[in-house]
Image (cartoon, coloured by chain):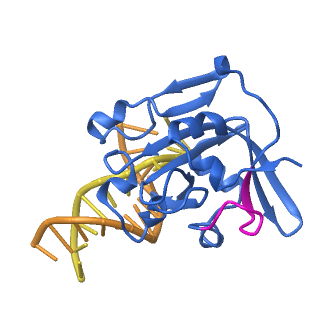
Chain colours: A blue, B orange, C yellow
Amino acid sequence: MGKILSGKFFDRPTLTVAEDILGTFLIRKIGRKKIEGMITEVEAYIGPEDKASHASRGKTKRTEVMFGKPGHWYVYMIYGMYYCINIVTEKEDYPAAILIRACDQVKGPGRVCKYFKINGSTWLTINKKPADKKTGLWIEDRGIKIKPARILRGKRIGVDYAGRWKDKKWRFYLR
DNA sequence: AGATTGATCCAT
DNA sequence: TGGATCAATCTG
C-alpha cells in the first residue's frame, strides 16, 4: 500500500524527521488484523546533553537502543502503568529518538500504545527491534503531503525538570 | 489537585 | 539493596 520507512529515512537530523513523520501512518499487524493511524503529534529527544532525554545519563540497558541504529523501536514503561513508543533516529552512537504522542483521534503517548496493543505482554517483541513487517509494527508513507502551515511547534510535555532543555520547541503537531 | 503503579537507576 | 524518580492518565 504505502512505502515502508526504513533506517535511511530515520538517519537524518531528528527535527527534520520529526516534521516529515507527521502525516505518515503507524501500522500494527497482529495475526491477520491491522491497526492503523496517521501520526499527528511527536516529540524529539536529541543527543547526550538533552536533560529531558533518557539518554542524558548515558548508555544503560534500557537506553542503549537510543544509541543504536536508526529505525528501531524504543519502548518503555512509565509510572508503572503506561507504555510509550519512540523511533530511533540519527547515526549509531548518537542517542536520539522521536516519541509518538498522538495518532488521529488517539491523543497522548500512553493511549497510543494502548490503542496499538503495546502492553506488558507485547512490548518485548517490539522494543529494540527494527520498524518493519517482521516486527509487526512499522511506519508507512502513503503520500499524504502536510502543508508547512499545518504544522505547529511547541515545548515538550512533562519535562519541567530538564533545566534549559525544557524550553526547546521540539514538539510538532498538526493543527 | 491527588492517586495510581512498577521498572529503572544510582547512592548508600 | 533501598528509595527517589518518572517523556502519563484518570478521577474528582
The answer to whether C8 is drawn above or below residue A167 in the figure is below
Residue A6 locus on image (x, y percent): 69, 54
**Rendered position, A41 above or below A121:** above
For the C terminus of chain A, the quadrant is: top right
In depth, the one of A130 and A158 nearer the eye is A130
Residue A54 appears left or right of B5 = left
| Picture residue at 34% right of the left edge, 51% below the top | A48
Q: Residue at x 36, y 30 (%)?
A: A167
Image side of residue A24 versus residue A58, left or right:
right
Query: Residue A141 or A52: which is nearer the viewer?
Result: A141
Q: Residue at x 80, y 62 (%)?
A: A29
Query: Which residue is outermost to the top?
Result: A149
Give the side of residue A104 with respect to residue A89, left or right. Answer: right
Q: Is residue A133 magenta?
A: yes
Residue appearing at x 33%, y 53% in the figure: A56
Which region of the structure is painted magenta? A129-139
Q: Main secondary structure of the magenta part?
A: loop
Q: Where residue A67 sits in the image (x, y, percent)? A: 44, 60
